Amino acid sequence: MTVTLERPKQESPADAVGDSMTVAVWTVISRGTGVIRGVVIAAVLGATLFANTYQFTNSLPNLVFYGFLGGSMLSSLLIPALVRHVDTADRAGAERVAGGFLGIVALGAAVLTPVAVVVAPFALRLAAPESGGAQARTGILLVVMLLPQIPLYGLVATAGAAMNSHGRFALAAAAPALENIGTVVVLAAVAILYPGIGGLAQAPTGALLLLGLGTTGSVGLHAAAQWYGARRAGVRLRPRRGWRDPEVRAVLGRALPSLVQAALAAAQLLVLLVLANRVAGGVVAFQLAMNFYFLPIALGATPVALSLAPRLSRLHAAGNNPAFRDTFVNGLVFALFVAVPAAAGYLAVREPIARAISYGGFATDNGTALIATALGALALGVLGETAFLVATYACYAREDTRTPMYAMLVQLGICVGGAGLAPAATGPGVLLVLGLSMSAGTLAGAAILVRALLRRLGPGHEPLAGPLLRIVGVAVLMAVPAYITGRLISTVVGGGVGGVLAVVVAGSVGVAVYFGVQARLGAPELDWILTSVRQKAGREKAVRRNAVRKKVRRDAGVRTNLALLLGAAAVGALAGLNPLQAAAVVVALGVGGCVYVWPATAAYLIVFLTPLTAGIDRGTIIPVLRPNEGLAVLVGLALAARWLVRLRVGTFRLPRMNAIDWSLIALAVFTSIAPLAMMAARGREIIADDLQYAIVLWKYLAVYFIIRFSLTSRAEALRAAYLSIASACLVAIIGILQSLGLFGVPKLLGTLYAPFGAERVLSIGRGSSTLALAAAVADLCIINLCLAIGLLLYTERHRKLLLAAVPICVFGALGAGEFSTVIGMLLAIGVLVIVSRTWRLVGYAVPMLLLGAVVMWPVIQTRLLGFQSASGLPDSWIVRLRNLNTYFLPQLGADHNWLLGVRPSARVPASHEEFGWVWIESGYVWLLWGGGVPLLVAYLSWVVVCLRRGVAAARRATGVVAAVGLAVASYAAANALLMLFDPHLTYRGAADCLLVLLAILRNLAVEERT
């Protein structure tokens, strides 16, 4: 068989450059979020030893897996083994090999995790003996919580290899951004809950738990996304005994030198971090500088190396050493074309960069000096790391794993030898020694590796020295005006804003000079870039011209890539001005993008997060809005954008409406438009409070339609139901601990969930939890109790978890300390038994309620003390009746106000009250007060619709639809009773949950009426 190697179109430098563009774009986004994460860590934790401890322990899982276990190297060697099975459609074989690899990683993690637990505190104590004891104690707790990341990274690497073997690269490159965003969210929570934590002598245990578990949870989110991508590619991942699989053992045998090389690199970084810990904030500053260090490598070297690997492998298989040498040289030159000006730029504007990213606890002269020194010292190392990486992949293409290992040994020796001088230095000088040592080692190792590779390949046609001298010369020329510009602007403006402005302007000047001079000199690298862009644009147009009905998979177009690059740049600039705002923008863009691509994500987020955030007062985190309201606005805008983009001329249709839709619309109209029109007709003053109450039902209606237009299948509805129950259980557990006064939960809730800032109400023996309203917690528990029982009756999955959710919801409802909601729960259970005709549930309910009464007896006992009034009624009910008779019923009965209502506002000012208001504490009085008889009729009609549709679904449908129908019917009956006591219809969290179930019922019920 003849193998044709001359394929100029496929093997041209321009095509290699084009193949790396998509990888580079997603890498920019991932690395950009990584930089933001580093900035936020510095801002929140400051230049402190605690920051060192967190950063060091958080780096250990990465070092252990990608270093001592050689994760990235093993993953790249796993791909060929998987490809053989993928090409033969052997799915079982691919899953066997991938699972075996995952099992070996899990075994390695089990061996190394205890070692890391022992070594980490010792390293912290050794590096900073004056405070090592305190650091070690904190480090042990963090290490225990962070080291579970090691097997998660193993899942990430295995899933990435599985996707790459199927030709899928985007998710594998983009998913690390989820981990970075999750960590930023955790740090933002720490900043809000524990302000100034870095300066404390001892970090609170709650803060350590939040940091440790939250960071590991972010890695879990990353791993889950990668696992999902592998499953979508057709590979189901689960650990297997890979040490018994000959094919997996063969992969490991070939990878042994690579494992040694990766372990050496990890040891090098570990030594540098340990020595950086001698300076307060040194680990954080060095890691921040390392983020910038790896950025040009990720943009230049990594995409080039990945795109060259298959080309070089084919050339090696054909024995064409001259072509191999020329292809390698072209790739190396292009990678350095990106890396050299980046290194020069770092040297020129290191101080403005340090100012731009120094905020919060790092916004000091010392913090800025640490970052600037580390970045400047590491700058030259960018060149060595770039050349070393490209040459390593070229050696792997020649099946040579030993030469890179020997070069790594030299690099490690030089680096560690130089770093040994660091203890003699102080302050920023420590980081200067460490950075220069690393740079010297990488340059020496790269020189040895490139020289050895070129010597074995022999002569070729492509020059290396000439292009390298040209690139270096132009980069030096570029650095001069960039330095002058950055220094001038940062001196004149000053502060963080001056740093950002200096970086932007100096960077623009440097880029203009660099590319301008290169263009003047006729640099071929620019031709490669332009040619690849034209080729991509041409392919995009061809796809549009020849589009067929079937779904085809293609890379994003040039416009998309440019938009992503500009977006990443904008977020980076915002990170310099305000890291927390930049993090919020990244999270919002990520959420919006997910909702745009997967609309059901909107429902999942609302279902799970609303009960956990609805009790936070407006303006506490987001201006004007509660967090759950901001989330609804965000996902609503994303869904609207998706609808507008997909809208075509002549395809617009009004949505079909049924009784559920009309009943909700009627409630919204008769709580807002009708009473406001009545007030205008009667000449009554409409105040801001009326307008605020008038939009309440409209907000809930918006949530209903978001769910209705995002959940369209039974599978999606089932996921939403599980998420609802999970969220309710979390709320219930927090409420139970709060009502019993355990683990400092009331004090912890006081940081965000105290209504109107009154922390006292969180310690009165009622479980208001994250909804800041005990009755709302009880309602939420009742709804999800009925939903969990319905899923147990009508589905077969996750029965143990659902069985566990039942007592949690019962205890949560009892922990709310509301006798009215206990009555409502009993009625809901009774209706559930009648509708489902499952009479045996009564036998389960009685002992469950008795057990709940025993567990929650301290709460019940406290509430029983309120029955010592002369009338025998609870004190709270007596106050309720007095308020109704004093403030509301007289005005409601005057002038026939009960016909059309008094006003939308459901409260009146009362200066003697703690919060300055008296609220209507009767749902039916609220209906007559807010909208009169029309609103009362609308509510009763809504109850009838819910009962009829719920009962019909429970008795005629199956699966999740039947369970939802049962929950809707049961709670609608309970709500009709509970409205005697309070306006339960609009209680936050519970009302959102009910509307989610109504939307599912409306979309998926068997019988629909127009």
Image: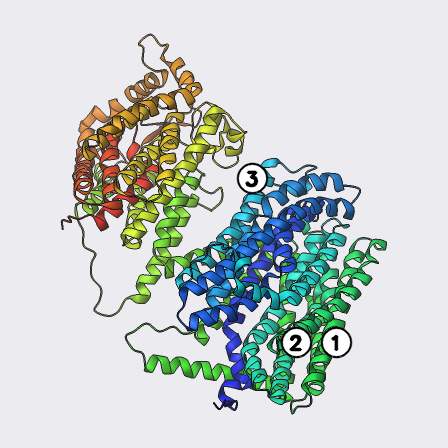
Which percent across, then down, holds residue 297?
63, 70
Mark 3: amino acid:
Leu
Query: Residue at 59% of width from left, 64% of height from top?
Result: 252
In the displayed structure, would residue 184 be above or below residue 264? above
Number of residues whose C-alpha sits closer than 10 Å to that of mark 3, classed few (under 14), some (14–19) or many (20 or more): some
| The label number, if any, that marks residue 598 in the structure image | none
For this orientation, the residue located farthest to the left is 1009
Colour approach in the figure: rainbow
Query: Residue at 47% of width from left, 43% of height from top?
Result: 619
Q: Earlier in the sequence, mark 2 or mark 3?
A: 3
Mark 1: amino acid:
Ile
Query: Residue at 27% of width from left, 28% of height from top?
Result: 978
Q: Which residue is denoted by mark 1 in the rendering? A: 448
In the displayed structure image, the side of residue 975 where residue 253 appears, left or right: right
Q: Which residue is denoted by mark 3 in the rendering? A: 193
Q: Earlier in the sequence, mark 3 or mark 1?
A: 3
Instruction: State yes or no: discs 1 and 2 in contact (Cβ < 8 Å).
Output: no
In the displayed structure, would residue 10 be above or below residue 598? below
Name the element at disc 3: helix
